[in-house]
Every structure is written in structure tokens, then in C-alpha cells.
Image (cartoon, helix red, strand yellow):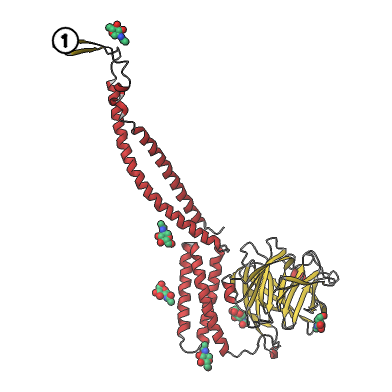
């Protein structure tokens, strides 16, 4: 699945060559068998078959010498045929010698090809071992990532006044990488692996630089603090990676979470749905951002089953819509056991009112600074979005708001500081946050904040109040955005 077409063709033609060589050797061996019979012509004939030629009568002459007369039969000894055979044998013998020298030459060549095949096989095995498939798209995504890194470094250069050797060096390295990717695109696609590794290293360096800078920038809006207005703008997409199950797993969700027992850890969860776009069966947990980048998961777990991409994680518990029911499920991530199931009152389910372009997401769980929410619809709301605040311990509904926004006409939604944000597609590359509902005031509003996306369909959006970032599952790719907010006075 991961072997490039060019690689396959190479392999096939080497195999063909081998077969050809083998058949050549086989025919040479036949020649050999024929020519080794050469000495039997001429020399052994008379000794083995004397009868037809010999009619001997012997007598002694006067000097006591024995005289014999031999009567040859009518048909004379086939001298000419014998000569022809002898000539033929000689010709064959010469041919055989030349073929024999060719065989040893071919044998050497075969050894070389065998080595090459072994090399190719190893390469292919290596490619297959890395569970991710590399497609045309990777180049596009790498280019987006590189341009994003370029932008960040340029930004860093301007914010870090004066000369900074590390940043200058990073800038050169990223420029080099960009050139490399362009060259690679016209050459061997398999080398994309090497580029990936280099990019992970660079991304790590960049992150360190950024964090260094952040310490110097006074942040007015610390995470967890709601002393700000609505979303003002959203960053370029940071493409983190393809989900661990691969390109075919287009539906799913991911995000960052915290375990109250280990608050210092930067934890991530990734939950691609099965390829049917319906069942949530497997998820993985990562103990750090670096682990996530390197696909080094802490554990892979199975649930039987959640439904839809509306899953979220809050304080070490995963919340999901139990399949074929209006139940909410609560799963302890430490033990991977479902600790609670409870119906969400009046909620429509079984793909009744999902999002536009995304099936089975009747219940969309969300987390904000104040805790756990669920976004859904009821028959009574005729498909309009209903928002409920949940008690995350008991899964009881604490409060409910009905909006005037029809759920199947929005592509996804998330909640920040009690404000619901809903999105819709503008085109295949842009999504727009166009609608807000503020549960603090009960007011709805229209806004326009454009989100650049990598692929067409947004399967889920999850806000993390821990880092104030937005986590998008975009046709199988894990994308992350930084959000900027209006100052409170600007409202
Ligand atoms: C040998 O030659 C004699 C005399 O010509 C003849 O009679 C006899 O049949 C021959 N024998 C054979 C075995 O041909
Ligand atoms: C096989 O691969 C090794 C290392 O990757 C390389 O040194 C060697 O030259 C290759 N052999 C052939 C026959 O291509
Ligand atoms: C960038 O590429 C140039 C030429 O390809 C090379 O000389 C230089 O060492 C590279 N710089 C870095 C930092 O990789
Ligand atoms: C941050 O500020 C400190 C003190 O003002 C300074 O020493 C340090 O170099 C700055 N860090 C960066 C990355 O500019
Ligand atoms: C919003 O963010 C984008 C991408 O970072 C940037 O190009 C644009 O200028 C920003 N717009 C505003 C109004 O800040
Ligand atoms: C949530 O439920 C738990 C367990 O029933 C209860 O102890 C707690 O007071 C509830 N919290 C709120 C905010 O209602």
C-alpha cells in the first residue's frame, strides 16, 4: 500500500530479468548435455557394433603371417555423415564454451540483481512498517507546514530584536528544506520519510524558540481566563500529522486533555472512527506533543462502541454518544472502562440531525473553561441546535439553551467561555465561523472569521481551554489553530 508505483515497476522488471537469465541458463545446460556426447562419434562405433561390418576368414601364409579378409557390406561406411557429425560436434563445442563463459558472467550479474532486490525489499518492508501511507497530498501538506514554519521564524526574527544566531540558523535550515522538498517532488517520493524526520526536528526547535519568546510576551488572556471578548481571528493551520490509522480514516476527532493527577503533562487523544464514518472503536493516547509527532502512543484502546465524531475528553474521562441509542457514555481513560451511561433527555439520535457533510454526529460534546457541554437537537427544536451544560460527574443536565440555528446546516461547532461558535464551508479550502450563541446572555450573533483548512470536510472541532487552541479533524488529518480574542472593551 505504501510502495510507490515506480518502486513496484522497478521490482517487477528486475524479477523479469532474473527469470530471463534463469531460462537462458537452462537452455545452455541442454547444449552442454548434447556436446558432452561428442567423443562417442567415430571412436567407439566399431568397437561396440562389429557384426555388420566384419566377415572374416583367416589363413596363414607361407611366412607364417596371419592374413584376414574383411568383406564390407554393400552400403559403405558413412564417412561423410561421420565428418558432418564431427564438424557439428566441434561447432557445438565452441558454442558451448562461449555459452559457458556467459553463464558465469550472468551468475555474477544475478548476484548483483539479487542484492538489489534485497535492498528494494528492505526498503519496501520499511515503508510498509511505517503505518502511514504517503500520497501526493503529503507534498502539499509539507509545503503548508514549511511555509508556516517560515512565517513563524520571520515572526520570531521581528519579535526577538537584535541578532539571534539560533533563529537565523533555523531560517536557513527551513529555506534549505523548502528547496529540498521541491527537488524531491520531481524525484523519489519515498524520500519523503527523511524529510518528515527532518521536519519533526525543526518543528521541535521552533517550538522551543516560540516558548522562549512567549515567556517574554505578557499574555493578557491567560488560558482558563474568560476576561476577553469573542474570537477575533484564527491562525494559519498547523498540520500536525495524518491520523495513526491512515488516509482512509477520514472521520474522527482529536484534542488535548489534562489528567488532574498529572497536571504538568501535555496529553493528547486521537480517535479516528472506523471507515464507515459511524463507529468509534479505537483510540490512542499520547503522553507528550513530541510523542504525538512521532506516533509514539502510550496505549491503544478499544470501545464497543461510540458513534460519530462528537467525542471529547475532559479531566481523564472520554465522553461519547453510545451507538444506536440516545445515551451519553463516560469512559475512564486510566482503566478504559465505561463508568456511566445516561440518556440525554429528548435528544435526537441515529443520524437524525447531524452536521452538514458529517454523518452520525447527533451529539457533539464540548469542553470550555467552565466544564462539559453537549451540542445536539431535539424533535421539539425541529433540528435547531440545543446546548446543554452537563454535570461531568453525574451526566445530569444542569441547564439548556435552544438556538434558532438549524444543526444540519452548520458544519461543526465548539464552545469557548460559554459561547457557542458554529462553522460553515465557504469553499474547499476555507471554513467560516459565522454564528455565535452566548449562553451567558442568551443572545445569538453573526460573525465572520475565516479558517483555512487543508482538505474539504471538517469532521470535528474541539476547543481546549488548557492551551486555548482549536483542534480540527480534517479528512483524516490532525490540524491545530491558535485563537486570538477581542479585548473586553472592544465589545
Ligand atoms: C561371409 O562370406 C561368405 C563368402 O563370401 C558368405 O558365404 C557368408 O555368408 C558370409 N557371412 C556373413 C555372416 O555375412
Ligand atoms: C544496498 O543498500 C546499501 C545501503 O543502503 C548500499 O550500501 C548498497 O550499495 C546497496 N546495494 C546495491 C546493490 O544497490
Ligand atoms: C543549506 O544548503 C546549502 C547548499 O545546499 C549548504 O551549503 C548549507 O550548509 C545548508 N545549510 C544548512 C544550515 O543546512
Ligand atoms: C527574554 O527576556 C530576557 C530578559 O529581558 C532576556 O535575557 C532573554 O534573552 C529574552 N529571551 C528571548 C528569547 O529573547
Ligand atoms: C488573521 O490571521 C491571518 C492568518 O494568520 C492573517 O493573515 C490576518 O491578517 C489576520 N487578520 C486580522 C484581522 O488580524
Ligand atoms: C454534580 O454531581 C455530583 C454527583 O451527583 C454532585 O455531588 C455535585 O454537586 C454536582 N455538581 C453540580 C454543579 O451540580
**How many numbered circles does the render carry?**
1
The C terminus, quarter of image: bottom right
Residue positioned most to the left: 63
Does the image show residue 26? yes
Residue positioned most to the right: 380
Q: Where residue 69 appears, x then y in whole percent?
A: 23, 12
The residue pinned by badge 1 equals: 61
The N terminus, quarter of image: bottom right
Local crowd size for mark 1, using a 10 Å CA cut-off: few (<14), some (14–19), many (≥20): few
Q: Is residue 78 depicted above or below 238 in this figure?
A: above
The quadrant holding residue 264 is: bottom right
The quadrant holding residue 234 is: bottom right
Task: Determine if the C-beta at disc 1 is less than 8 A from ligand 1.
Answer: no
Q: Is residue 173 depicted above or below 302 in this figure?
A: below
Residue drawn where x is 29% and y is 36% of the image: 94
Q: Identify which residue, 51 or 94, lies in the foreground.
A: 51
Does the image show residue 406? no
The quadrant holding residue 267 is: bottom right
Q: Where residue 213 appears, x then y in whole percent?
A: 55, 86
Q: Where residue 280 appears, x then y in whole percent?
A: 71, 66
Q: Is residue 490 depicted above or below 28 in this figure?
A: below
**SS category of the residue bearing label 1:** loop
Amino acid at each position: 500500500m505504501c510502495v510507490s508505483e515506480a518502486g513496484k515497476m522497478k521490482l517487477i522488471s528486475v524479477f523479469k530479468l532474473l527469470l530471463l537469465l534463469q531460462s537462458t541458463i537452462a537452455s545452455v545446460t541442454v547444449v552442454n548435455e548434447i556436446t558432452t556426447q561428442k567423443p562417442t562419434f567415430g571412436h567407439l562405433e566399431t568397437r561396440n557394433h562389429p557384426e555388420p561390418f566384419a566377415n572374416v576368414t583367416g589363413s596363414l601364409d607361407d611366412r607364417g603371417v596371419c592374413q584376414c579378409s574383411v568383406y564390407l557390406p554393400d552400403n559403405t561406411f558413412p564417412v561423410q555423415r561421420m565428418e558432418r557429425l564431427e564438424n557439428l560436434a566441434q561447432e557445438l563445442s565452441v558454442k558451448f564454451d562461449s555459452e559457458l563463459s556467459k553463464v558465469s558472467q550472468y551468475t555474477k550479474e544475478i548476484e548483483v540483481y539479487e542484492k538489489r532486490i534485497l535492498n528494494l525489499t528492505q526498503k519496501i518492508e520499511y515503508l510498509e512498517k511505517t503505518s502511514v501511507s504517503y500520497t501526493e497530498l503529503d507534498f502539499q501538506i509539507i509545503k503548508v507546514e514549511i511555509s508556516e514554519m517560515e512565517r513563524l521564524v520571520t515572526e520570531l526574527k521581528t519579535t526577538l530584536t537584535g541578532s539571534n544566531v539560533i533563529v537565523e540558523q533555523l531560517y536557513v535550515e527551513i529555506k534549505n528544506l523548502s528547496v529540498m522538498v521541491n527537488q524531491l517532488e520531481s524525484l523519489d517520493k519515498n524520500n519523503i520519510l527523511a524529510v518528515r524526520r527532518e521536519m519533526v526536528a525543526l518543528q521541535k526547535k521552533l517550538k522551543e524558540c516560540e516558548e522562549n519568546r512567549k515567556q517574554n510576551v505578557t499574555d493578557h488572556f491567560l488560558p482558563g481566563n474568560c476576561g476577553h471578548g469573542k474570537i477575533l481571528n484564527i491562525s494559519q493551520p498547523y498540520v500536525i500529522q495524518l491520523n495513526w490509522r491512515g488516509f482512509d480514516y477520514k472521520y474522527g476527532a482529536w484534542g488535548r486533555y489534562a489528567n488532574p493527577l498529572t497536571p504538568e503533562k501535555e496529553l493528547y487523544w486521537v480517535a479516528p472512527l472506523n471507515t464507515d464514518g459511524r463507529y468509534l472503536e479505537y483510540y490512542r493516547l499520547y503522553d507528550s506533543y513530541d510523542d504525538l509527532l512521532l506516533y509514539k502512543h502510550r496505549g491503544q484502546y478499544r470501545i464497543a462502541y461510540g458513534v460519530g465524531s462528537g467525542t471529547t475528553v475532559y479531566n481523564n474521562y472520554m465522553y461519547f454518544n453510545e451507538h444506536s441509542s440516545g445515551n451519553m457514555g463516560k469512559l475512564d481513560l486510566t482503566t478504559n472502562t465505561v463508568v456511566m451511561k445516561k440518556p440525554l433527555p429528548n435528544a435526537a439520535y441515529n443520524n437524525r440531525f447531524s452536521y452538514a457533510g458529517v454523518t452520525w454526529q447527533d451529539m457533539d460534546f464540548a469542553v470550555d473553561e467552565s466544564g462539559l457541554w453537549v451540542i445536539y437537537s431535539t424533535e421539539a427544536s425541529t433540528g435547531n441546535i440545543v446546548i446543554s451544560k452537563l454535570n461531568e460527574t453525574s451526566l445530569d443536565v444542569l441547564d439548556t439553551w435552544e438556538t434558532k440555528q438549524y444543526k444540519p446546516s452548520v458544519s461543526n461547532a465548539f464552545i469557548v467561555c460559554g459561547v457557542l461558535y458554529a462553522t460553515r464551508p465557504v469553499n474547499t479550502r476555507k471554513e467560516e465561523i459565522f454564528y455565535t450563541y452566548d449562553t451567558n446572555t442568551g443572545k445569538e450573533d453573526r460573525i465572520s472569521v475565516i479558517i483555512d483548512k487543508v482538505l474539504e470536510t471538517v469532521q470535528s472541532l474541539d476547543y481546549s481551554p488548557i492551551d486555548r487552541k482549536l483542534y480540527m479533524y480534517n479528512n483524516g488529518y490532525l490540524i491545530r489553530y491558535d485563537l486570538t480574542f477581542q479585548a473586553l472593551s472592544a465589545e
